[in-house]
Amino acid sequence: MVKQINWQQILIQCKNNIQKQIAPLLKTLNQPQPNLGIGAGGDPIKQIDLAAEEAIVKTLKEHKISFTLISEESGEKKYGETPNENFVTADPIDGTTNIDRGIPFYATSIAVSTKPILNTIHTALVTDLPHDITYIAQKGKGAYRNYQKIAPSENTSLEKAVIGMDLNTYRVKEIAPKLSSIIQKTNHIRHLGANALELCYVADGTIDAFLDIRGKLRATDTAAAWLIIQEAGAKITTPEGKPLNIKLDPKQKVTFIASANPKIHKLILNFLRREKE
Ligand code: IPD
Ligand code: CA
């Protein structure tokens, strides 16, 4: 018989253990850091990223769960006797540069799925670690911020919208022109440095849209927020307006337009289309 697992409870335990595990490391960030090589996602591994990943693995092992971990740090690793029953896609720390620089905006992101494919995710958690704000979603059950049901903004005016966009790429000369008419139209552009959390801000109405068309963001950063966005009733598609469905793989990259409601989503997609023509 397949074991019933209370994933929501377990993901909350994971984030509690991450907070405990990283607390002492946060105090030593101004000291020289060990060289731990390059992670599966292609960035240098920091002690704090590894500590957060270890907290996730330890928590799941304590519950005797078999799983395949798909992580930005260690890549793909199998645990237990039936690891293909559960896929756990994690970015243990999203916003590592913010942590390094003392900017209090970073998160952990964990998604659980039945296959290594985005649209099989059934439970997701993103926690804003410094503020202890947790976004949780379960498929078909809505999305919650610290146990309060969330909904996206109803704003449909681009002029009034707060729009996040990530232009953090050496390909900026190619990417920025595609977004220039949206930038001209709106008065409030933001990028806060932890894309999983910025996507949750679309889900709960803090901002109206978040765009990442660089082709640089990893599936591990996006997986959990993808379900949170859907369950909150916001929209997330490819820049062409197609449903997002990607492989959950540490090397998989993703581009998307996430927005609060169908009207503002359509406006943004139309601006992108026009820039192409
Ligand atoms: C990064 C953040 C950042 C984005 C980078 C990501 P990380 O995640 O989400 O906002 O610009 O592309 O890699 O490396 O801190 O997990
Ligand atoms: Ca990371």
Image (spheres, grey):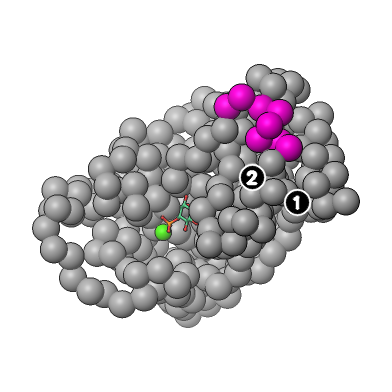
Q: Which residue is mark 2?
A: 211
Mark 1 belongs to which amino acid? Pro
Rendered residue at 31%/77% (across/down): 37
State the extent of the magenta-drawn residues as a range.
181-188
- Mark 1 CB in 8 Å range of ligand 1? no
Label 1: which secondary element: loop
Residue 13 visible at all: no
Q: To which quarter of the image does residue 102 belong? A: top left
Ligand 2's image quarter is bottom left
Q: What separation in Å lies between label 2 and label 1 (alpha carbons)?
A: 9 Å
- Mark 2 CB in 8 Å range of ligand 1? no
Q: Residue 105 at what x, y percent from top left?
A: 37, 40
Rendered residue at 69%/49% (across/down): 177
Q: Residue 142 at what x, y percent from top left?
A: 64, 35
Q: Which residue is mark 1?
A: 239
**In this picture, residue 193 sits left or right of residue 141:** left
Q: Residue 182 at what x, y percent from top left?
A: 71, 36
Q: Nearer the viewer, residue 81 or 77?
A: 77
Rendered residue at 74%/21% (across/down): 157
Dots 2, 1 in contact, CB < 8 A: yes
Rendered residue at 34%/70% (across/down): 44
**In this picture, residue 132 sits left or right of residue 149:** left
First-in-chain label (2 vs 1): 2
Mark 2 belongs to which amino acid? Leu
User: Which quarter shows the N terminus?
Assistant: bottom right
Q: Nearer the viewer, residue 51 or 101?
A: 101
Q: Residue 260 at what x, y percent from top left?
A: 69, 31
**Rendered view: 163 above or below 88:** above
Q: Indicate whether residue 223 is drawn in magenta.
A: no
